[in-house]
Amino acid sequence: ESSKQMTMSMRFLRQQRQRSNSTIAIGALAAFAATPILLFSGGLVSVVGFSTTSTTTTTTPSTIRNRGIIAHGMSASTTNTEQPLLSWSELTQQTAATAVGRALNQQVELQKSGGGAPARENTLRTFGQDKQKPAVTLFRDHAAWCPYCQKTMLLVEEKRVPIQIELVNMRSYGDKPREFLQKVPNGLLPAIQVQTSAGSQIITESQVIMELIDEWFPESQGFKRMQPKEDDAAGQARYRKLANLERELFSWWCTVVFRPERGGIFGGGGGISGALKEFLNCLEKVDQELTSTNGPWFFDEFDYPTMIDFIYVSHVERMLASVAYWKGVDLRNLQKYKLHGLVAWLEAFEQREAYLAFKSDYYTHVMDIPPQYGPGYDGGLDKERQQFSGQIAGKDGSSWHLPLSFDDPLQPLYKGLPLPLHVLEAVGIEPDSAETTSYETCPPALMEQACRTMAAWKLSGNGAKVAKFAARGGPKGGKNPRKSFAAPLADPYAEADEQVQPYVDASLRVVCAALMDMGQDGGEEDAGKLPSEALQETLKAAVPANHVEGVVSSLAYLRDRVGVPRDLPLASARYLRAHLNWACDTLQS
């Protein structure tokens, strides 16, 4: 993490080629404050909130009535009976009664004792080992946007290392807790605290942390090995070669994205600058290294990803998003860029549940990258850039609007796990085959039901706090009265607009009901349907005309702050964003 934006001078680039990847971590995806994410303007008030049993609600005018919000599984359009607008407590009970809700609530209980699936919010991982308090505590970013924390967590999950986890916000999104700064004065993330007979020790730098964890939890004790053996000269040489290549790729990425394109300096034609060509050439070298092995990973010796895979993937993931958004380059387009090894490697990662737990979407990345690395510059292929940036930011009129397409045109959802495995299993969604965990042939309506129900579960479980957070977007919402942060969308000291907050709360309860407004069986006739007319009328009745503008701006404020993976995986988050847009459009119609 750095308190200042990176200056992408040539001197900086030369230095970065020589430095360890961990030292460049500006870390805790400060950028996401720039991104729309529910969490960090809100102090830790996020859709993700685990308070699934919360019954606190914001009082709304007693005149608000609901004609369409009824028990889940019934069509809202089948009754003309007026019913009171359901409370957050009632909505929580409805989501908890679904197969998805039961599976998610069970995971919450398992996580309390260090079990359950990989998840951003985990604060203890035991992997079924003895319940003795782990000797190692990892400090990582709260939202799972930091690339250096991401690669460290991927290694922890793959090795199944017992560990305590403390979640700390990144500097770009707000002030770090005093307790953390007393332990780590420079505020760097990730960091580990190790308890020894001589006391505790703090260690920073992701590369050092990963190597130490691999050393402390060795293969001889049943843990997976993450590096070639010390006496394996060929393996060690290949590791060094790949590590140097990763630094070269990182440097070209910085040159391409964070420096203005100048044709006279970089040369190039047809929209591809010299720097972009060199970046693509370097990616071809990476692709060749991947295709030189028999499996998807960088080392044939292992049938699982190892440290060098984790070192690469955390930044390659951000490269995919940034060059699509700022340069119009879709690196997963095999017909155009032919990076077959790289795409197969990405798909292998996407079939691992731990990767889903810490993977962001393109929108989150293009918002959280600038606070960490500096602003990105438009260039490259203009036509494609305009198309891709519109899709990524939801400004193309369709990508964030109902009805949604089954898949995302830039970010394949079903080449791997679109949702946590326990959610998929709860509704009976099976993978394409016994040999893979891809879901390209799954029933669209059943998948939509699972995605929407997960979003409703998250929203209902923390609804009143989310409404208060969203109301910051109202006309009298706070504008960060104390201080600003590197991430433009982060305003942790802002206050809600109390005049619109009750109506924002009511609107979000209608949104939650709309997310649940599908048949229980996920029949094909339920796929892609817009919310019922009854729900539209309920929403309109919930907001007085003089507060429509303030509620719409509040819902948009929230929409722009739904982050991946902090709040939801992309497959589910896209439905929440789209339903928030539906609410905005309905109120303005």
Image: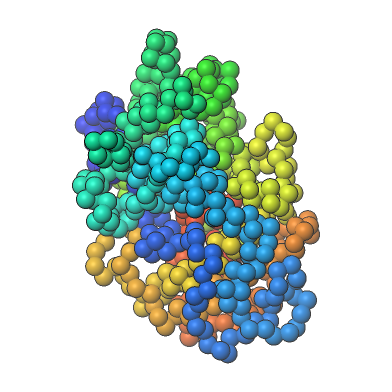
Question: 306 or 29: nearer the eye?
Answer: 306
40 or 97, which is in the foreground?
97
Quadrant hosting residue 40 = bottom left
Position of 157 with respect to 19 (left or right) is: right
The image's colour scheme reads rainbow
Quarter of the image with the N terminus is top left
Give coordinates of residue 480: x percent, y percent: 29, 68
Residue 367 to residue 96: above or below: above
The image quadrant where one finds the C terminus is: bottom right
- The answer to which image quadrant residue 314 occupies is top left
Measured as percent of width and height from the top left, residue 582 is found at 59, 68
Q: Position of residue 502 (x, y in %)?
A: 48, 80
Determine the residue positioned at 75% across, 71% down: 75
Residue beneath the point at 55% across and 45% down: 117
Residue 209's place in the image compared with 411, above or below, is above
Residue depicted at x 23% and y 36%: 198
Q: Residue at x 31, y 30 (%)?
A: 208
- Vertical placement of 5 versus 510: above or below? above
Which quarter of the picture shows residue 435? top right
Q: Could you tell me residue 49's position as x and y percent?
A: 48, 61
* Residue 96 visible, this orientation: yes
